[in-house]
Image (cartoon, helix red, strand yellow):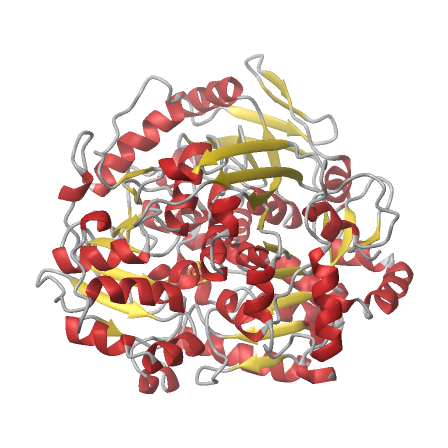
Amino acid sequence: MNPNTPQALKPRTMFEKVWDAHVVVEPAGEPTILYIDLQLVHEVTSPQAFEGLRLTGRPLRRPDRHIATVDHNVPTTSVQDRLHIVDQIASAQINALRKNCADFGIEFFDTEAAEQGIVHMIGPELGATKPGMTIVCGDSHTSTHGAFGALAFGIGTSEVEHVMATQTLPQDKPKTFRINVEGDLPAGVTAKDIILNIIGRIGTAGATGYAVEYAGSAIRALSMEGRMTICNMSIEAGARAGMIAPDDTTFAYLKGRRFVPKDAAWNLAVEQWRALVTDEGATFDRELHIDAATLSPTVTWGTSPGMVTTIDATVPAITPDLDEADHKSYTRAYEYMDVHPGQPIEDIKVDAVFLGSCTNGRIEDLRAAAKIVNGYKVATTVRAMVVPGSQAVKAQAEDEGLDEVFKSAGFEWREPGCSMCLGMNPDILQPGERCASTSNRNFEGRQGRGGRTHLLSPAMAAAAAITGHLTDVRTWKFNSKT
Amino acid sequence: MIPINIITSTAVPLPLPNIDTDQIIPKQFLKRIERTGYEDFLFYDWRYNLEVPDHVEPRKDFVLNNPAYKGSQILIAEKNFGCGSSREHAAWAINQYGFLAVIAPSFADIFFSNAGKNGIILARLTEEEVETLIQRSTANPKHLITINLEAQTVTDDQGFHATFEIDPFRKHCLLNGLDDIGLTLLHEEDLDKFEAKHNNEFWLAPKSKVVA
Ligand code: SF4
């Protein structure tokens, strides 16, 4: 069903419009079979799915609805290291993807292709991600693509195989949840701070079972980069998906990209995409309102993305409203993170700074960080690195001279990939090391066994690299000239 | 998938909330391209002492290393079990280690679906019920729990009796060991019809280079 057909009698949410347009069949007593428009494939969660197809002799139904790249495993140290990967298991996994894509006819962007990058970066960059689509990937941060008004969610490897074999997925319809962020963001407060604040409020399971729509003037005012940051972390609140209605910002970003309609088809598409927005009068199962003006730069202090506080606050104490399970998590987190209740956040010293990932490895993120770094040097006690999320971002940043700003300050300037976001390649923290990171997960050991992670915005990460401790960007003294 | 219905077994208590998939199976094992052989890596960072490089030693204080729990087919944990990364390796590791069921007050979404596809029963009980079972299995590693999928009950020999909800479709698949892909392909005719029409949807144009 086309989302614009007048059969939509009842006002519908954007999520419902996209869902309805992809229902293949609703067998009695079974989950809905939902059509999937695009599957993104990477080296880590796909080998067993391809193996499954081979074992059952099933063909890959729609190779043209798949795009593949390498991101999780690739070294980011140098082009040389990427071409000759020392880690034999990682190398075998990458080779397996090369072979699988060739065997099954999937378009593959290899390590040094101009299109290579983290899957959630390249979908939008290529215009493969578009409003109204259903998009999946064997990676939980697939929710990123919802920033374009697509229904996008992460899946497991059996489901990856399911999509390969049928281009569909059996799905139970999630409930709907609208989060309205209204008003103007104060200076120094970014998309990352919005989403960290939301997760802190509703908890890491706060949106489980829901498809979230982010709305309100503060969301509208964000760039596509900012919107992707927000949708990216929807999964950290447990949401099945996060979505933002497409508008002029979305269309301006997409226009002219490789997989986007051209000329008359473009105009038609834009017209129809506009109709995707939630109808007046449509109802959500749940709503939350946030006043943007009340937000401050936000960081995590513990070992879950819900353990957040503001930069000018202290490590929170266990309060009576926390249940017993949270009580335990807090106690464990204090110990693991080596922080104590009442400790000022700005007093927390860091050993490493990681700027990158599918949450904050985009050009706008690097620009914001470079503005802070400009004219300063990285603290002598800190190891700092910038890992652009994709080749396109890296090239753009180099064009703008951002790499020079970072390098002359003492940052490492890396090749694109997931890198220290999850430390599957050699970029890891040592036990006890503490990192200010623009990524999305601060679980125990996420960035290396025993490593401690504080999640924050790119500007805040950059400031921490310079001062050597978590720092309030609102008081930063910018050097206007290099 | 192997059909599953009644499990009677001792249970391993893991009294922590928010056990994420990074803890269930750390990322270094995600580089493997095989679908089997994950049992030894389950809860790796908790299970082994990794202080001395190249000398991996089981930690005596970790419950899985307690010989009294050997052969357990049930795992009990606190709320939001399986949160975090979508890695299906977590379900493989749990299953290949020998667990056929996990009992907890709640489960994360993606893990929930991965577990089902790998023939693992997830039984959601109330926090109090879980607490009771954790206490009993901690106090006595020989404590036997019975999960009856058909009846949707969890019982023990000390009078514990709880029921859990499971969606009828998933129950049907678990009881009969049905493969999801095969089930979807039963609807291939509908799929062909839908796809022929859907191919013309404006948001798909242009397709990828392969068919452009
Ligand atoms: S950057 Fe991090 S979160 Fe994003 S896809 Fe890579 S590993 Fe996953």
The location of residue A81, given as percent across then percent down, is 32, 83
The location of residue A415, given as percent across then percent down, is 34, 77
Q: Is residue B187 left or right of residue A244?
A: right
- In depth, the one of B11 and B178 nearer the eye is B178
The residue positioned farthest toward the left in the image shown: A380
Quadrant in the picture for the N terminus of chain A: bottom right
So how many labels did they put on this image? 0
Q: Quadrant of ligand 1?
A: bottom left
Q: Is residue B72 left or right of residue A297?
A: right
Query: Is residue A19 depicted above or below A373 in this figure?
Result: above
Q: Quadrant of residue A365?
A: bottom left
- In depth, the one of B22 and A353 nearer the eye is A353
The location of residue B100, given as percent across then percent down, is 59, 41
The location of residue B143, given as percent across then percent down, is 49, 23
The residue positioned farthest toward the top in the image shown: B159
Q: Quadrant of residue A280?
A: top right
- In depth, the one of B107 and A254 nearer the eye is A254
Q: Quadrant of residue A414?
A: bottom left
Image point (37%, 41%), residue name: A304
Quadrant in the picture for the C terminus of chain A: bottom left
Image point (65%, 45%), residue name: B116
Image point (23%, 60%), residue name: A462
The answer to whether residue A429 is visible is no
Q: Is residue A385 left or right of residue B206?
A: left
Query: Is residue A460 depicted above or below A76 in this figure?
Result: above
The answer to whether residue A200 is visible is yes
